[in-house]
Amino acid sequence: MPISVTAQQLLSAIERRLAEISQIQHALAVERAHLQQHTGPLRLGVLSPEAVLVHLTAHGVRLAGIQVNPRKERRARVALPRAGVEYRGRSSARQPAWIDGSRVPADPS
């Protein structure tokens, strides 16, 4: 059974396969970077496992044995206080309310 293939055909097939391997290696390098990015904060306890899983899922990284349940009941969000002064109206007679809820005493003059 003679093999009739030209050098040009063989070179093009090798180049196509090398291009495929290059694309796979790039995808794996990107996935590795995403995984390494989250290992430190997860080990230190800075990020919760749920937050890391959400970030990895958003980047398209899937881990074997871990399933994401998007319908899981979410915690209620806590309103964060605003920094600085909050005015409760346009009237200049009103006093500003500070973050801790205290009010500035009225100027006696």
Image (cartoon, grey):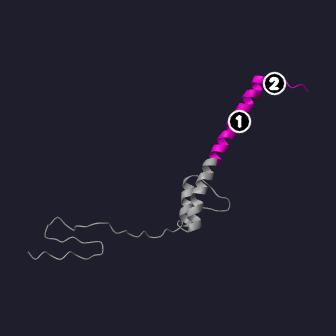
Q: Which residue is mark 1?
A: 18
84 up-or-down from 29: above or below: below
Give the side of residue 39 with respect to residue 103, left or right: right
Please name the residue shown 60% across and 52% down the image.
33
Please name the residue shown 63% across and 56% down the image.
62
70 vs 26, nearest the viewer: 26
Is most of the magenta stretch helix, strand or loop? helix
Q: Indicate the secondary structure of the residue bearing disc 2.
A: loop
Q: Which residue is mark 2?
A: 5
Residue 76 location (% of width, % of height): 44, 70
Determine the image quadrant of residue 3: top right
| Quadrant of image for the C terminus | bottom left
Question: How far is disc 2 from disc 1 in space, using C-alphas?
Answer: 19 Å
Residue 17 location (% of width, % of height): 72, 35
Amino acid type, callout 2: Val
The region drawn magenta spans: 1-28
